[in-house]
């Protein structure tokens, strides 16, 4: 294999081919030794020994690819990993880089293979320390890319546990991270300058106009051929004098002339003044054999350099004949060697993806470079690419126009990143709006709650005062009750007394041998003693309450009416009458009746008393 490993196993290559065709992920450029070790490790975990069987597993089990993907891609990383190299970057490289740029120039940084983001945030810290947060926010953009979506999600959250921050000096940890619920979040105001996106270093176009490109501990997974290809793209991505910072174990560039070492030990390089002179790193052997013209020496080198450039380019002569096309133009726009020598107008690229002829004419006439932005090219169904096209007049030493070069810079990745960013921004905005409306709802609820609490408080007050009133009433009732009890007590005593008096009177009445009748002012019987019962044979309960004149007894009661009347009208009345009557035994008897008035204390008669005695013959 091209990474120098003797390992070549057709069956294993089939696994890689299967992954490329079914999942669009190309592992063929990875070093075989570690790749095979990792795939076998995964196979042994699920008890598969044969590559063919493993392809079957990948086909039937939809989740297997992502597990394998995680097994192959190693996401190990840390803040300021290899402290000494970072120290040098902070102390020497960044200050020089900033000094070379104008005070307001944008500073564009790319962390390629950023894993869970520690490297990108380390860059943010290093730059913010050098420039101050204000300038950092205004000028710096850090593009951080990886092929592993899970790692990118982690990186986007910018949230780490204490252990992750161990490699960070404590004062930087305190300054750049906010602690919340046991996690540490990178400062939000600086986080906005770090833009994460998916970029496959093997297949996707690079991000351009980069001042500082950091690709550490990632290149080492690729074989030499793929590394060369990626380095060619990095060369294109960097601005003139741009800096490339590789990992400690990445040795490749020791013999390169497209990058000059700033510090070889720490793997820090600067883009060489003329990259075009040394294309050896990205010209594949196949391409060398493909060349149509057998040029020698410098011309051959120049042609290879032109052809191998990762940027699509076409050159037309002063009279609009296609003079040069490179491999990238062939691959992207479908041109071929046959198109060289044809008038531009007969070649599709003259009007697709953009009408070029007008611009070429203008560049030639005005001798000025032109830039056409946002040019879209549909490479295949659903496969949109975006370009920034530069049209440059080529002027000879004698100031004559030699031709025009048209360069197609692939900005698809940057545009996608931008779209991702806009999308993320929109999501953020809508999340913010939702948050705001939730907040408003909460405020309303809060107000309602407050007013309910106030109402409850008022009700409580009212209840309290009602309670107080009730308590007062209760006290009053209690004292009334006490009074009533006293009255009751007095009444009871009185009743007992009355009962005694009554009994006394009763006993008097009963003890009298004579019959005694007591009448009220209406002449109704109030008392009827035993003597009266025995005399007239009528029981007390039969007599009491009856009108005197209605008593059916042997006494001619009607004869008593005048005396009773007199007794009822005269308080001093006392008179005796004798009447013939029939007693209870039916004997005719003579009855002596003494009628007297019943006087109350005031003197007015309350009734009359009749005392009756049978006269002996
Ligand atoms: C060991 S980590 C290096 C992280 C960081 N640069 C550092 O040095 O701490 C390697 C990273 O390279 C990423 N990677 C592997 N193949 C890649 C590819 N084809 N394109 C982009 N990134 C890739 C992996 O997903 C992983 O996150």
Image: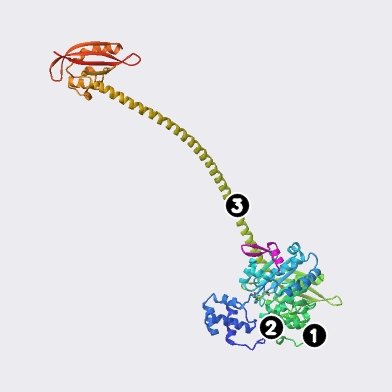
Asked if labels 3 and 2 touch by Cβ distance under 8 angstroms, the answer is: no
Can residue 179 be found in the magenta stretch? yes
Q: Provide the residue span drawn in magenta.
A: 169-189
In the rendering, at what x and y percent does residue 580 appear? 16, 13
Q: Which residue is mark 3?
A: 440
Q: What residue is shown with label 2?
A: 225
Residue located farthest toward the right when viewing the structure as drawn: 398
The one of 140 and 251 positioned closer to us in this rendering: 251
Label 3: element kind: helix
Q: Residue 540 location, x and y as percent?
A: 22, 23
Q: Is residue 287 above or below residue 586?
A: below
Q: Secondary structure at mark 1?
A: helix
Residue 425 is situated, as x and y percent measured from the top left of the image, at: 65, 62
Q: How much space separates mark 2 and mark 1, taking CA atoms?
A: 23 Å
* Contact (Cβ within 8 Å) of mark 2 with mark 1: no
Of the image marks 3 and 1, the number of the one nearer the N terminus: 1
Q: Nearer the viewer, mark 2 or mark 3?
A: 3
| Of 543 and 467, the residue lying toward us | 543
Which corner quadrant of the figure contains ligand 1?
bottom right
Magenta-colored stretch includes residue 183: yes
Quick one: quadrant of the N terminus? Answer: bottom right
Name the spot of residue 64 as percent of width and height, x first. 55, 76
Q: How many marks?
A: 3
- Disc 1 marks which residue? 298
Q: Please tell me which of labels 2 and 1 falls first in the chain.
A: 2
Q: Is residue 456 left or right of residue 95?
A: left
Q: Residue furthest bottom?
A: 6
């Amino acid at each position: 294999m091209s990474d120098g490993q003797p390992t070549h196993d057709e069956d294993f290559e089939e696994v890689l081919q299967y992954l490329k065709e079914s999942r669009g992920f190309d592992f063929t450029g990875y070093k075989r030794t570690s790749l095979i070790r990792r795939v076998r490790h995964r196979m042994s975990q699920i008890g598969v020994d044969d590559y063919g069987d493993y392809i079957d597993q990948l086909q039937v089990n939809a989740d297997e690819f992502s597990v394998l993907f995680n097994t192959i891609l190693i996401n190990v990383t840390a803040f300021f990993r290899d402290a000494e190299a970072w120290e040098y970057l902070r102390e020497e490289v960044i200050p020089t880089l900033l000094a070379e740029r104008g005070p307001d120039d944008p500073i564009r940084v790319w962390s390629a293979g950023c894993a869970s983001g520690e490297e990108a945030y380390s860059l943010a810290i290093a730059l913010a320390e050098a420039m101050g947060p204000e300038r950092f926010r205004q000028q710096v953009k850090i593009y951080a890319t990886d092929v592993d979506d899970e790692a990118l999600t982690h990186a986007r959250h910018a949230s780490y546990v204490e252990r992750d921050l161990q490699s960070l000096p404590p004062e930087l940890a305190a300054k750049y991270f906010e602690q919340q619920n046991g996690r540490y979040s990178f400062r939000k105001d600086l986080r906005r300058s770090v833009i994460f996106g998916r970029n496959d270093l093997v297949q996707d176009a690079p991000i351009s106009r980069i001042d500082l490109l950091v690709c550490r501990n990632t290149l080492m997974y690729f074989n030499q051929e793929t590394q060369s290809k990626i380095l060619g793209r990095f060369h294109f991505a960097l601005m003139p004098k741009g800096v490339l910072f590789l990992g400690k174990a990445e040795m490749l560039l020791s013999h390169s002339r497209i990058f000059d070492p700033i510090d070889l030990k720490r793997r820090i390089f600067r883009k060489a003044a003329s990259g075009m002179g040394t294309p050896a790193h990205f010209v594949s052997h196949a391409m060398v054999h493909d060349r149509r013209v057998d040029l020698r020496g410098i011309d051959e080198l120049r042609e290879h350099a032109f052809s191998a450039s990762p940027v699509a380019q076409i050159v037309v002569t002063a009279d609009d004949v296609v003079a040069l096309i490179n491999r990238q133009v062939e691959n992207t726009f479908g041109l071929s060697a046959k198109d060289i020598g044809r008038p531009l107008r007969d070649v599709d690229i003259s009007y697709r993806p953009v009408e070029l002829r007008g611009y070429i004419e203008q560049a030639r006439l005005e001798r000025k470079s032109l830039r056409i932005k946002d040019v879209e090219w549909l490479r295949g169904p659903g496969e949109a690419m975006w370009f920034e096209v530069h049209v440059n007049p080529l002027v000879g030493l004698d100031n004559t126009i030699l031709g025009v070069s048209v360069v197609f810079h692939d900005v698809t990745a940057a545009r996608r990143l931008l779209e991702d960013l806009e999308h993320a921004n929109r999501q953020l905005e809508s999340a913010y709006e939702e948050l705001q409306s939730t907040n408003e709802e909460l405020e309303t609820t809060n107000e309602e709650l407050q007013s309910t609490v106030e109402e409850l408080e008022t009700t409580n007050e009212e209840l309290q005062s009602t309670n107080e009133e009730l308590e007062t009433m209760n006290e009053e009732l209690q004292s009334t009750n006490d009074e009533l009890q006293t009255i009751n007590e007095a009444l009871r005593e009185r009743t007992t007394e009355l009962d005694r008096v009554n009994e006394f009177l009763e006993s008097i009445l009963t003890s009298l041998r004579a019959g005694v009748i007591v009448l009220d002012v209406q002449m109704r019987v109030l008392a009827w003693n035993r003597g009266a019962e025995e005399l007239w044979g009528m029981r007390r309960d039969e007599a009491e309450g009856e009108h005197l004149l209605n008593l059916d007894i042997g006494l001619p009661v009607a004869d008593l009416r005048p005396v009773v009347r007199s007794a009822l009208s005269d308080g001093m009345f006392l008179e005796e009458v004798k009447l013939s009557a029939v007693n209870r035994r039916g004997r005719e008897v003579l009855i002596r009746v003494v009628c007297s008035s019943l006087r109350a204390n005031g003197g007015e008669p309350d009734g009359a008393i009749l005392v009756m005695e049978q006269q002996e013959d």
